[in-house]
Amino acid sequence: MNTNPNKKPIKVPFMDLYAGIRDSYPELIEKIGYLIKKTQFIGGEEIGCFEKEFADFCRAKRAVACSSGTDALILTLKALGIGHGDVVITVPHTFIATAEAISAVGARAAFVDIEQKYFTMDPEKLQQYIKEHPKEKIKAVIPVHLYGQMADMESICAIAGKAGIKVVEDAAQAHGAEIKGKRPGAFGDAAAYSFYPGKNLGAFGDAGAVVTNNESLAVKIKMLSDHGRIRKYEHEIEGFNCRMDSIQAAILRVKLKRLEKANALRIAKADIYNSMLKDRKDITCPQARENYKHVYHLYVVRVKERDKTIEKFKKAGVSFGIHYPIPLHLQPAYKYLGYGQGDFPISEKLSKEILSLPLWPEIEETTIEYICKNI
Ligand SMILES: *Cc1c(COP(=O)(O)O)cnc(C)c1O
């Protein structure tokens, strides 16, 4: 994760994952050891318990554990019956997995631009796309809850509802984010979560989950994730092998107990950044929407002269990230969609200004001070 071409010792890492594990280390080792002795590697009670506990955390009815956030998106689109000839709308300012899931089920991704202030899907652009493409088989929209803050779900769900299209939330970066107390999974038809190690809730490898209030959708997704079966050797439909490992479920159950606290710490540390940077005219701090709970998966600022800041950071040994430097519509992989420079001006402009500063729940205030001094 640390790229330091000057080969100077890195003083500040981009994140410190072990800091969030240290206290739970004995419990984690004991649980893993127990499962090894029991040879419980696939399925079993850890999976069911995690699903119940994570659904409760999301304040939703069901969670289905699976192998990754990407697979959570694919399983959801598949379960909603989306496939060849269909169009799914999302944003170009996201991680590629959001769009990959759309093509993985045979559908085509269509992009709409984001809101400059919040980095998430602009509902007006969604409305406009639907209006301007009456002949397309638009089946779903995937708003992305980026950096820890949810997209404007009230507007997006209202637009999608009128147009008769499904809403699949990409909640890979938004465990515990809220709009008026509601969390991802309770707004759209379903939300896809990732437990990639660096996410707000991270496994010790790849893992993901789909969260939904729709019971029959949950049953279908569970079946699809496990070879389309309900019981051993009884296959209702053709599915995939997208299960979560039992060991990952056990690890996630231990880490889930600390997630509310870890999110509260992230918010507190983001507040420290905000107050230290508030007088800087050349830096735009992340904006939290009113009535929204932002859980700061990443602390992303906008800087006018990013190259200069990066040089300073490198000299000072401060690690950083850029999420994401090339919008999806300009990626070689999506050339075939036929988009070009200038199609999504906000995404293009922001991709040149964004800078992710080091943030993890346990980061010290003095470290934040050091970073702010060197920005
Ligand atoms: C991490 C991430 C994904 C993919 O999750 P994986 O578990 O790595 O497959 C999807 N969308 C967004 C926005 C992400 O940040």
Image (cartoon, grey):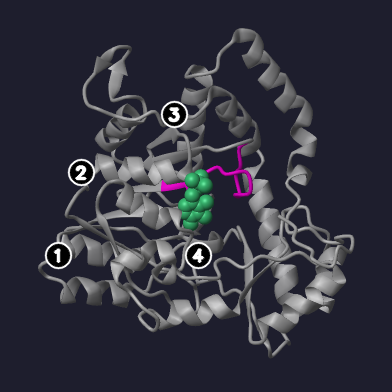
Q: Which residue is mark 3?
A: 243
Towards the viewer: 95 or 292: 95
138 displayed left or right of 4: left
- Under mark 3, the amino acid is Arg
- Under mark 4, the amino acid is Tyr
Which quadrant would residue 41 be assigned to in this image? top right
Which quadrant would residue 215 be assigned to in this image? top left
Question: Relative to 246, is 85 above or below?
Answer: below
Of badges 4 and 2, the one in the foreground is 2
Secondary element under disc 4, as helix, strand or loop, is strand
> Alpha carbon of mark 4 to alpha carbon of mark 1: how far?
33 Å
Residue 91 - label? none
For marks 4 and 1, the one nearer the N-term is: 1
Task: Report x, y in % for residue 266.
Answer: 68, 58
Q: Which residue is mark 4?
A: 292
- Under mark 2, the amino acid is Gly
205 displayed left or right of 120: right
Residue 81 - label? 2
Which residue is at 39% across, 84% downward?
Answer: 342
Q: Which residue is mark 1?
A: 136
Task: Report x, y in % for residue 263.
Answer: 64, 52
Which residue is at 23% across, 73% downward?
Answer: 129
Residue, far bottom: 281
What span is colored magenta in the figure? 192-203
